[in-house]
Image: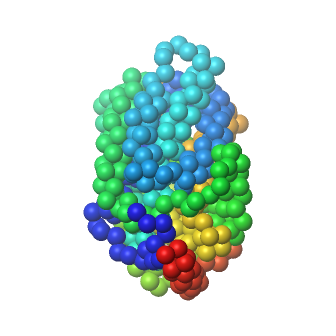
Amino acid sequence: MTNLNISNDRIVPLSSKFAFGVGQYAEGLKNTAFSLFILFYYNQVLGLSGTLAGAALFIALLFDAITDPLAGSLSDNLKSRLGRRHPFMYLSAVPLAIGFVGLFSPPDSMGQFGLFAWLTIFAILTRGAMTLYHVPHLALGAELTENFHERTKIVAFRQFFGTFGNASAVVIGLGYFFADSEGGRLSVENYTPYGITLGLLMIITIWYSAYGTQKEIPHLSVPAEKPPMNIGKRLAQETKEAFTNRSFTWLFFGVLIVFVMSGVNNALDLYMFQYFWELTGAQMLWTQVALMVGLMSGVFLTPTLHRYADKKFGVILGTGSWAVIQVIPVVLRLTGQFPDNGDPMLITTLITLKFLQGILLQQALVSFGSMMADVTDEHEYTTGVRQEGIFFGAIAFSAKATSGLGNFIGGVGLDVIRWPTGPGIRTAADIPPETLVKLGLLYGPIVAAFAILSLWCYTHYHLTKELHAEILEKLRERRGANSAGSV
């Protein structure tokens, strides 16, 4: 293993790209389970108030504000036989699965405070264990190569399998455990088996990813020699240094806004499906699968897009399109220009829009991941230190805002519009019409409007393909000089 090769502008073997990508499957499972089912389970099924359910997940997010950059710093500075990233990947899998199963298995008759405490504790455990895996895994992807286009392919593999994990969580849930034939989404006994199934899949795919990328360790960098420093002081210093990078700062806040928007919508998806659109379980499944298929299809379009347009365009295109498509069905329904509930054209139109939304959104997700890897090169050029972990720790935190802050806002929103809860609330007929209208407005126009802020942030990103090439050339010269000086 070498310390910052003079050039790591290489083509990564397909087997390593595949194994790295598979590692995102576990995060896809966790994210979808958190975003789609947790608020609905604790609020609608178990009766915990929306505000308390959202607050529990928001508290877990506050812990992430510390653990995500901490995991990045620890993995940036670890020295071991297995390199900087792999020990964390191996060790995190089992604790993650245990915490995740506990999340879906609260004891009976706990009451409001008991449910709130249980959700808070197991959300913290689950997300903390995922942090120990996910942040080093993301950082590993940025280290595999410095090639501008190869990085897009690596991120495409990661996004494909992450979306496959999203789709699996949906299919396993809506297609089996929560299918109408099994009692639907309101049957409390279906949630623990669902958690166990996904927990086992997480262990298998995480260990496969770690083992399958282990052969890449000789091509990765090792920590630079630094004077001993208190971990808290080092973390504060490294985080401060990261936010001095202008490109990273604007990317972070832009994606944080859009992830929170997405989180609110994901938290309310089942409410919209069950009550606003009045879909059957099978129709819910196909609508979600259409989004996932669109996301997976979009992966194959991004490398072509990047040949003709820069990565910033991909992020802007995907974010803006997601917001517009999110608004269209709700606005048309509220103005009487959308198919009625029960009309076959309703599900056809929703599926088509979700598929298109997935294709376009993926352009933003892949472009963003590739841009972040480029930012680490710029940071090394500016500071002389390579810190993929601290950057991707911050990005992992912003991604967790999808379910953390998103569920909090969604839960508070449900209480504000006085949404009725309990397994007895089964159809739209059980909901006041004005409350359904408020749900639609919250889900569509109100949340999606914040995309304007996100797009404004992205316009400030300045790292172009040409500038990145200049930075890499200067890095090679510097590394060559350092290597010659150390001989």
The residue depicted at 55 percent of the width and 53 percent of the height is: 77
Residue furthest toward the left?
15
Q: Is 13 placed above or below 291 here?
A: below
Q: Nearer the viewer, residue 236 or 106?
A: 236
The answer to which image quadrant residue 2 occupies is bottom left
The residue depicted at 50 percent of the width and 44 percent of the height is: 132
Residue furthest toward the front?
487
Q: Is residue 231 left or right of residue 37?
A: right
The residue depicted at 44 percent of the width and 40 percent of the height is: 92
Find residue 116 and report its horizontal and vertical position in percent. Answer: 61, 25
Find residue 93 and report its horizontal and vertical position in percent. Answer: 40, 39
Q: Quadrant of the N terminus?
A: bottom left
Find residue 244 and report its horizontal and vertical position in percent. Answer: 72, 65
Q: Nearer the viewer, residue 105 or 294?
A: 105
Find residue 8 and report its horizontal and vertical position in percent. Answer: 43, 74
Q: Is 119 placed above or below 378 here?
A: above
The answer to which image quadrant residue 407 occupies is top right
